[in-house]
Image (cartoon, helix red, strand yellow):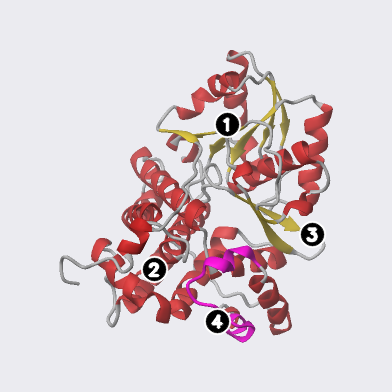
């Protein structure tokens, strides 16, 4: 790509009215040690610490509890959170929050505990059932104070105005999108991500890449979200393989966590697209890891969106050197580069259990997902069915 490539639509992005929201966050080694101080500054006395059993086994829960106690904050722990948090788990957490007299929430873990914590806060403040609030801007009253400590590098739930919950009746993951679920503070500590197993590192890293690419292509993008997305895409391409090759190296862990932050700032404000709409339906039905679903879908959706994103991909390629593999157009090269990265990090499976009879139902759920609103190209049901077919 020749130097001096122009960002298509840059003037529009610079002049169009857009809002940008983000929580206060602290990034760096030792950030988790500030959890007690931040809860104290928020006026909290007794918090509900939301996590999962896997995180608890690492010892990180005990570390955070110690930081809280040092600041005079007492805590109860709720660790009944699944990899794809269920609606009934949220409601159980709401009961624990009320029964323990908690006045705030600390979320420790990946996207699942953080999303569950957000949803507990929604119901604690607003009453009813968590599924009453799915959709966009349907949460009228802000949640109790929430402090998030991520232990994975990819979901960026600690920064975003998204919370995803599994509707166990329909077996579809549903989105709650509202600035009322943005945490009050995020303590983003690379040391908390070192214990991630390889496959989780790979899936969450590709999740961050998907966030950034969908934000880059989004119809609701702005100059600020686009610049954040570019940095995130470059960081994932430079750092994900290294983080897997050197799992104990905090610099590569920090770079991947930084990629997640940049991608989170981008997608929380530009929203997402068809990859996430399809991944929510797929993950809800088959109970698959969200990052894995995104990774398997990303190349196919880029190809589908090709007519609407070619100029933007030309410019992206001029800014992101690793998107240069293969031959053909910038879209072809991006697909080839992402495919190679996905294979290298071991996210490579076909979904043979995805029966054809399920596909119309999945497509219907994807087409109803609010993430689809900002996709650059409007799909029809048959388009979505064909994209799911490619995963089998």
First in sequence: mark 3 vs mark 1: 1
The residue wearing badge 2 is 338
SS at badge 1: helix
Of labels 4 and 1, the one closer to you: 4
Label 3: which secondary element: loop
Q: Which of marks 1 and 2 is nearer the N terminus?
A: 1
Q: Mark 4 or mark 2, which is nearer the start of the sequence?
A: 2
Please tell me whether the stretch drawn in magenta is mainly helix, strand or loop: helix
Task: Identify the magenta region.
Answer: 369-386
Q: How far separated are the C-alphas under marks 4 and 1?
A: 40 Å
Separation (CA) of disc 3 from disc 2: 33 Å
Relative to 129, 199 lies left or right: left
> Where, quadrant-wise, is the C terminus in this rendering?
bottom right
Using the rendered view, name the quadrant where residue 292 is placed: bottom right
- Which label number is shown at residue 168? 3
**Residue to which mark 4 is pinned:** 390
Residue 233 in view, yes or no: no
Q: Residue at x 71, y 56 (%)?
A: 134
Q: Residues within 10 Å of mark 4 (few under 14, many from 20)?
A: few
């Amino acid at each position: 790509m020749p130097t001096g490539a122009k960002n298509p639509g840059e003037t529009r992005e610079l002049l169009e009215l857009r809002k940008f929201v983000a929580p206060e966050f602290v990034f760096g080694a030792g950030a988790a040690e500030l959890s007690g101080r931040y809860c104290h500054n928020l006026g909290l006395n007794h918090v509900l610490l939301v996590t999962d059993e896997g995180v608890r086994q690492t010892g990180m829960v005990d570390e955070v509890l110690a930081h809280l106690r040092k600041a005079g904050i007492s805590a109860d722990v709720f660790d009944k959170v699944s990899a794809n948090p269920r609606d009934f788990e949220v409601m159980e957490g709401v009961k624990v929050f009320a029964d323990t007299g908690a006045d705030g929430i600390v979320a420790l873990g990946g996207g699942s505990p953080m999303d569950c914590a957000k949803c507990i806060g929604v119901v604690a403040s607003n009453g009813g059932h968590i599924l009453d609030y799915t959709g966009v801007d349907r949460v009228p009253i802000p949640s109790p104070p929430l402090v998030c400590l991520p232990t994975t590098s990819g979901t960026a739930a600690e920064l975003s105005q998204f919370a995803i919950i599994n509707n166990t009746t329909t077996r579809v993951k549903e989105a709650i999108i509202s600035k009322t679920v943005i945490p009050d503070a995020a303590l983003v500590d690379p040391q908390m991500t070192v214990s991630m197993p390889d496959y989780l590192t790979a899936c969450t890293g590709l999740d961050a890449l998907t966030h950034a690419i969908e934000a880059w292509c989004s119809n609701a993008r702005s100059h600020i979200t686009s610049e954040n997305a570019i940095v995130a895409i470059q960081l994932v391409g430079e750092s994900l393989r290294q983080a897997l090759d050197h799992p104990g190296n905090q610099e590569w862990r920090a770079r991947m966590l930084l990629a997640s932050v940049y991608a989170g700032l981008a997608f929380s404000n530009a929203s997402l697209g068809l990859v996430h709409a399809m991944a929510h339906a797929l993950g809800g039905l088959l109970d698959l890891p969200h990052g894995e679903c995104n990774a398997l879908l990303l190349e196919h959706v880029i190809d589908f969106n090709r007519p609407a994103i070619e100029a933007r991909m030309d410019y992206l390629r001029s800014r992101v050197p690793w998107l240069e593999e293969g031959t053909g157009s910038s879209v072809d090269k991006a697909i080839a580069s992402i495919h190679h990265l996905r294979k290298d990090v071991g996210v490579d499976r076909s979904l043979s259990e995805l029966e054809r009879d399920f596909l119309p139902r999945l497509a219907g759920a994807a087409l109803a997902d609010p993430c689809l609103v900002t996709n650059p190209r409007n799909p029809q049901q048959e388009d979505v069915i064909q994209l799911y077919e490619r995963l089998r």
